Image: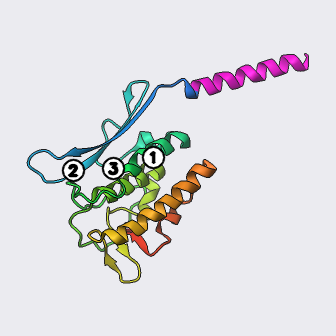
Amino acid sequence: MSFKFYFTIHFLYLFININSVFGQSIDISVSKTACSNSITGYFLNVEVKKENILLDNEKVYYDYHEMHRLCDSLKIRIIQKLFQFVSDTSTCCRKVGLYDNSEYGGCSAYQPQSKNFSIGIEALFIINRICYGSVINRVSCYPVLYNAETMKEVNDTNSLINVMVERYKEWFMMYKDSGKLPDYRFLNDGQIKWWGR
C-alpha cells in the first residue's frame, strides 16, 4: 500500500474525530437569578446543553458530574462565563452548608461561622466543582473563605475575597495557556483559602 493511501486514511480518521467534537451543538449560559419564595438574594444558574440535552438537569446544588466530564476546552468556555460574576458582591440566597460526599469525606470537623456568601464566592465555588469534581472536597467543602494569617473568615470582606479572585485569574491563565487543568492545590496556596480540611 502506498504512502498516499495511508495519508488519506489518516486524514479521514482525523476529520471524523475533529468533526465529532466540533460538530456537536454546545450551548453554555450562566445567569444570575433572583430567589423565589420571598428569600432575599440570588443564585447562579449554569446551563450547558449538548445536542439540546441539558447536562446536570437533576443536580442537587453544586453537583456538576456531567459538566465535570466535559473536555477542557468546554470547561474553559464555562469558566469564562462564570468569571463575569466573580466580583459580584450581592448575596447568594443559598446558605452556607457542607457540600461533602462519601468518596472524599472528612471535611473539617469545625464548622464555619459564616451564614452567607456572595455571588462572587458562589461563582468560584462552582468553578471548583465543574473543574475538579468530588476531589475538590480535599480543598473546599464549604463556600467559605478565610485568612490563613489571622485565621478569620472573610466572606464579608470584599478586599480579601478579591485576593482569591486574583488567584483564580492566575490559575485560569495557566489553564488557558496549557489547555491542561492545573493541580487543585494551587487554589489554596495563598493567604486566602477555602474552608475545608
Q: Quadrant of residue 94?
A: bottom left
Q: Residue at x 39, y 61 (%)?
A: 105
Which residue carries the number 3 mark?
A: 62
Query: Percent position (x, y) of residue 41?
Result: 18, 53
For the residues bearing labels 3 and 2, Cβ distance under 8 angstroms: no
The kind of residue tagged 3 is Tyr
Q: Earlier in the sequence, mark 3 or mark 2?
A: 2
Which residue carries the number 1 mark?
A: 80
The kind of residue tagged 2 is Tyr
Spot the residue most to the right.
2
Q: Earlier in the sequence, mark 2 or mark 1?
A: 2
Q: Is residue 12 magenta?
A: yes
The kind of residue tagged 1 is Gln
Which residue carries the number 2 mark?
A: 42
In front: label 3 or label 1: 1
Q: Residue at x 38, y 27 (%)?
A: 53
